[in-house]
Image (cartoon, grey):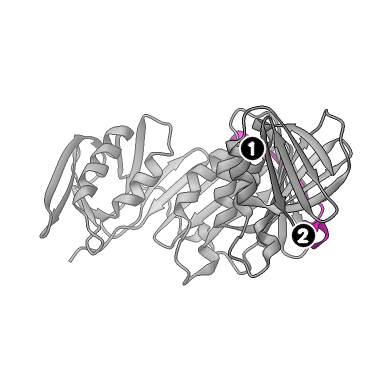
């Protein structure tokens, strides 16, 4: 195998796929990136057996077909330090590769390409498409609500559901829930539900681009897997097995008691007040009256914080406690200048409803 490729292009392609590398695996091959020249393309593939990322790069220079698996992190580190010139990468029959760029020359021992796990081919049946910007927005609005605890494994990811011409992502950790929906590129007669692992959701947030015109093609695969293809990138991921909670049942009916306030002002007040929280005492108080909201926190060890801001509130005066991180996470993903929060009671979830987006957070008990 021999290929000539600009250093910036090779580096960008390596940075796309390197997050699926697993150097700690007992299988040495999983710490490698598979480089394969076939036809007029260079394809780079990495996998940890749960998530696989593949990126294709069209070639214009003369080339020799072939493939080799090289240490992913070391290769990326080397390419990052090379000058912005043409890189000549050549793989020998003994699975050793040489890199030449300007005055720099490197030799890297590799592994046989035949040892690298094969990603399943993507399928057309059941495929649904959605613009990259739309899917990136769905991920941004929901990913923060995924659970990081291992006690309920099914919550360590997000539900991706397609029905007719609507794609929905739902994430919850049992204390908050985020749901976002967007229309697909074209109506589909296929419907599916899949729980995508948190790692894959985060990779989508990293790789999807707002300005890209290519749609994302999503297709269920055999063996409890799903593929997402956009531009030159393909992600294949195993799904989390199990029954995702019936989220529709926990979303309450709309409440008349709505607090309206400036989103940025609320976010600033919650962030400053949260400086007085501790791991043992996270709750901050919301004291709501028809014209003002007081966000406060008192700590025996740290002191106290209090911030008052103007609001419009339709309902009886209310004192309710929340984990401030749950509000900061959602407020920074929103675009609207004003936020409308339904507050049905001190022991009822607070809810934000917008077209295509619903967020609810449970209050905290305060001793």
Q: Which quadrant would the N terminus be assigned to in this image?
A: top right
- Whole-angstrom CA distance, mark 1 to mark 2, is 21 Å
Vertical arrangement, residue 309 with respect to residue 93, above or below: above
Residue 239 located left or right of residue 153: right
Whether pointer 1 and pointer 2 mark residues with C-beta atoms closer than 8 Å, the reply is no
Quarter residue 183 falls in: top right
Tell me the residue that label 2 is attached to. 116
Name the residue nearer the viewer: 51 or 147.
Answer: 51
Vertical arrangement, residue 50 with respect to residue 62, above or below: below
Quarter residue 246 falls in: bottom right
| Residue 2 pos. (x, y %) | 83, 40
Q: Which residues are magenta?
A: 112-134
Q: Which quadrant would the C terminus be assigned to in this image?
A: bottom left
Look at 60% across and 34% down and name the residue there: 209
| Residue 351 pos. (x, y %) | 38, 48
Look at 30% across and 45% down and name the residue there: 257
Residue 82 located left or right of residue 245: right
Q: Secondary structure at mark 2?
A: loop
């Amino acid at each position: 195998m021999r290929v000539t490729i600009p250093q910036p292009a090779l580096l960008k392609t390596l940075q796309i796929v390197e997050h699926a590398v697993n150097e700690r695996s007992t299988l040495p091959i999983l710490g490698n990136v598979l480089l394969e020249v076939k036809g007029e393309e260079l394809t780079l593939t990495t996998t940890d057996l749960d998530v696989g990322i593949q990126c294709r790069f069209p070639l214009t220079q003369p080339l020799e077909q072939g493939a080799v698996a090289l240490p992913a992190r070391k290769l990326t580190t080397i390419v990052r330090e090379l000058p912005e010139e043409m890189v000549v990468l050549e793989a020998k029959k003994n699975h050793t590769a040489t890199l030449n760029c300007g005055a720099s020359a490197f030799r890297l021992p590799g592994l046989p390409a035949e040892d690298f796990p094969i990603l399943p081919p993507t399928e057309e049946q059941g495929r649904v498409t959605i613009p990259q910007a739309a899917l990136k927005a769905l991920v941004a609005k929901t990913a923060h609500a995924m659970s990081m605890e291992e006690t309920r494994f099914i919550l360590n990811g997000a539900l991706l559901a397609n029905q007719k011409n609507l794609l929905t992502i739902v994430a919850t950790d049992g204390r908050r829930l985020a749901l976002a929906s967007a229309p697909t590129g074209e109506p589909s007669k296929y419907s599916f539900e899949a729980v995508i692992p948190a790692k894959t959701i985060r990779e989508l947030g990293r790789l999807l681009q707002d300005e890209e015109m290519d749609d994302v093609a999503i297709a269920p695969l055999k063996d409890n897997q799903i593929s997402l293809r956009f531009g030159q990138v393909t992600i294949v991921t195993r799904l989390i097995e199990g029954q995702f909670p019936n989220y529709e049942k926990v979303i309450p009916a709309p409440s008349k008691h709505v607090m309206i306030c400036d989103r940025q002002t609320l976010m600033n007040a919650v962030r400053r007040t949260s400086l007085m929280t501790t791991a043992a005492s996270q709750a901050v108080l919301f004291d709501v009256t028809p014209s003002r909201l007081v966000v406060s926190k008192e700590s025996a060890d740290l002191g106290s914080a209090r911030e008052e801001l103007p609001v419009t509130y339709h309902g009886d005066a209310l004192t309710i406690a929340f984990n401030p991180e749950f509000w900061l996470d959602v407020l920074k993903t929103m675009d609207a200048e004003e936020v409308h929060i339904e507050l049905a009671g001190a022991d009822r979830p607070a809810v934000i409803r917008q077209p295509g987006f619903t967020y609810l957070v449970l209050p905290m008990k305060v001793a």
